Image: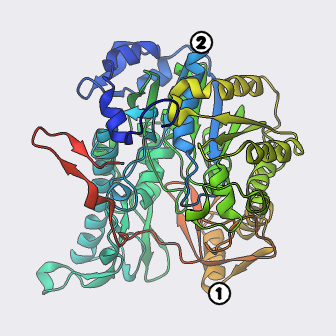
Amino acid sequence: MRGGRAMRSDIEIAQSVAPENIMTIAKRAGIDEKYVEQYGNDKAKIDLSLLGESKNENGKLVLVTAITPTPAGEGKTTTTIGLADGLKKIGKNVVAALREPSLGPVFGIKGGAAGGGYAQVIPMEDINLHFTGDFHAIGAANNLLAAMLDNHIYQGNSLNIDPRRITWKRCVDMNDRQLRFITDGLGGRVNGVPREDGYDITVASEIMAVLCLSSSITDLKERLARIIVGYTYDNEPVTAGDLKAQGAMCALLKNALKPNLVQTLEGTPAFVHGGPFANIAHGCNSVIATKMALKCGDYAVTEAGFGADLGAEKFLDIKCRFANLKPDAVVLVATVRALKMHGGLAKTELADENLDALKKGIPNLLRHVSNIKNVYKLPLVVAVNRFPTDTDSEINFIIDECKKLGVNTVLSTVWADGGNGGIELANEVVRLCEEKNDFTFCYEDNLPLAEKIEAVVKKVYGGNGVVFTKPAQKQLTRLEELGFAKCPVCIAKTQYSFSDNPALLGAPDGFEVTVRNVKISAGAGFVVALTGDIMTMPGLPKVPAANKIDVSADGEISGLF
């Protein structure tokens, strides 16, 4: 039992709640029916013209992030949803803005990404499956560009593209390691020009980043045109615009650019739109969805993927920079269980009180707190997602340690209690939003690319510096020659550690981060630095989540988280 209710699976809880009609939810968010494009009774897309025509002042922007993730779980999305419901409980006009989950993780390691327990967005099954078709549109646009590129080479290659220097990959929304490296165009001349190729998972596609960072259809088309797909024999970049692909790609993405409106279990409006992974991309929902939430609510609650060293850093240094956003408050989610894992305990040893392990693991939380407070200069609260096995001594220890940094800690029980379990957190967030802040980026635009990467490693990760491989050094030099020196950097790094080594838990120091490859995402507008052994196409685990998913004769899904 948690919160006095029997333990049920997330999907059982979600299926037990009858959703309100989406037109009711739209009205609650102050959205006129003329902007609503219904997808059934419980989800809708919202026309982009709302942003330009709304006379509302922007609400307060609240970012939810977390400590470095562990297999014990943190509950970041759950807290985001529960906080939104908590704000609604205390009479605030609030709208959530969440990331859209990928099909890949659904059938891979986990079952869903729509919150958990009594803090979920619904329809949970749709959100975790095909939803409104956004991911299909992103994959289609990505693969159209790939097809047009290879067709151009096959048809005579007037752009002088070097097939050995093609950087654009195909994509599919599934964890499929078999597709990481392939050879295509085999079987004779009519089947294309043979070359080495490969697939990324759809969320790792630059198209996803472009969609999430675009502010309008015009901006989307311009960004698509700037995408670099490869280089000529003379080492000059070739773009999607050179291939005249941007118009058709934009047509495929036209509806996908419109944010999706759904609801929480308690009827709070929520935009679920865009979902790049924060370990390989910038890890935030779309700029348009966030801005729409700000127009529709007095409070807009959003999230960024993985720990604050990844999602929050990229939200603040990339998304806020591009979209001219300024957060009013930050919520940093932690669990006693996860901190004890950072202190060296195995997952099977977390149920018993262990203050020694907690003391060893809490530096992870404190570094994230310090980063938000001292690097980015934002007010924050620590939300401890409480489990029944957590003891008062453990909780009090966290509270005392955070107080030393001038930060309050609030207990959250939204998993078990929904919005009621988020009221205390909601009140603290409202208080923080009234404080003035001096939001500052981690680095300035005019720094060389290498120094921007070093700034993140030293200031945010707590490392000593960066080692650039010779290929990475050459790539940096070439990118600056091509005019990309002022771009922000997007560091692809393991989510399990501040370092590039997933085995270094807690708050390691004295380490260096190795950058093995650097590439430009010209459409997105940032430079990607790949570290460690990070991959853009995951693989399935030994026992995929798919093994537990089923559908009954009447069409009811089970096993989806």
Query: In the image shown, does 458 or 249 lie closer to the viewer?
Result: 458
The residue carrying pointer 2 sits among few (fewer than 14), some (14 to 19) or many (20 or more) residues within 10 Å by Cα, namely: few
The residue at which mark 2 appears reads as: 91
In the rendered structure, which amino acid carries the disc numbered 2?
Gly
* Rendered image quadrant of residue 533: bottom right
Q: Classify residue 434 as left or right of residue 222.
A: right
Q: Nearer the viewer, mark 2 or mark 1?
A: 2
The numbered disc on residue 431 is: none
Residue 90 versus residue 363 in the image, above or below = above
For residue 415, say whether it is visible: yes
In the rendered structure, which amino acid carries the disc numbered 1?
Lys
The residue carrying pointer 1 sits among few (fewer than 14), some (14 to 19) or many (20 or more) residues within 10 Å by Cα, namely: few
Q: Position of residue 481 (x, y in %)?
A: 64, 71
Q: Give the farthest residue toward the right.
A: 404
Q: Residue at x 30, y 18 (%)?
A: 21
By what rule are the colours in the image chosen?
rainbow
The residue at which mark 1 appears reads as: 470
Circle 1: element type: helix
- Give the alpha-carbon distance from disc 2 to disc 1, as whole Å: 57 Å
Q: Classify residue 280 as left or right of residue 194.
A: right
